[in-house]
Image (spheres, grey):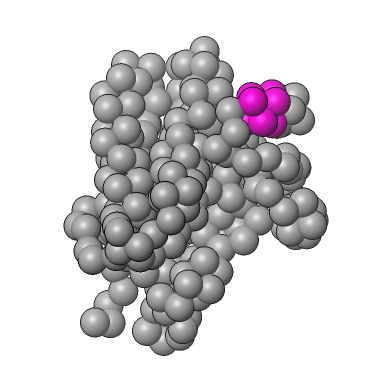
Amino acid sequence: MELKSKKAIITGGSRGLGKATAIAFAKEGIDVAITGRNEEKLKETASELKALGVNATYQVFDVSNYEEVKVGIKNIIKALGTVDILVNNAGIAAFGTLNDMDPKLWEDIIKTNVLGMYYVTKEVLPYLIEKNEGDIINISSTAGLNGNASTSAYSASKFAVIGLSESLMKEVRKNNIRVNTLTPSTIASDMAIELGITDGNPEKVLQPEDFAELIVAGLKLPRRAMLANASLWSTNP
């Protein structure tokens, strides 16, 4: 499928997986709007995207704040004119036993990773339904497939992303909207490196660009085909 001139929104688009996806989209000729909480990083990334010859814009908001989301999405639609693709990438992570993790942190992970995805999707979905076409890509994790010790908050949030995505997929197929749920294993994103999950060695660990390539490949499938879910793993144990 031709992607040039499509319009995309990527949450958490100023760094890591979001930025790599935004750059991959721009190289395909897709106009991109990125969101995040750090305006300086958003500006820098938007400038990089514009240098690739596409229309790029950004909005500063916290996906866990519904009022901010409503205003931000409206501003993005004004700037892009429409929307064809939504990538729900924004997310946070922290690890600790259920008993030791501060309840506020536990709640923040759920609010950002689950409610944030819900809020953004709720505001974007009417535009896709109106045009009877679109793509929604929700980023979960292998932590959403299997829980592990000290990952209760993060795993709970990513399990929820999968459940929400599968339900939404069945709701909007009749509207020619494809909903894809992606569950990558460890990727050398900024967040993973900061948390000490990986050293980011490109010889052994998946890179953000690998993940972005999977997203683009899924979008290029004919409209009759939908990549409902996919996991991406490193070839190295």
Query: Is 51 above or below relative to 65?
Result: below
Outermost residue, top direction?
A: 130
State yes or no: residue 1 in magenta: no
State yes or no: residue 70 in magenta: yes
Q: Nearer the viewer, residue 48 or 5?
A: 48
Q: Nearer the viewer, residue 88 or 64?
A: 64
**Residue shown at 29% from the left, 57% from the top:** 98
In the figure, residue 74 lies in which quadrant? top right
Quadrant placement of the N terminus: top left
Residue 31 position in % (x across, y down): 67, 41
Residue 65 position in % (x across, y down): 60, 33
Residue 157 position in % (x across, y down): 35, 46
Query: Is 61 above or below relative to 12?
Result: above
**Residue shown at 28% from the left, 82% from the top:** 236
The segment highlighted magenta reads 67-74
Residue 192 position in % (x across, y down): 47, 70
In the figure, residue 210 lies in which quadrant? bottom left
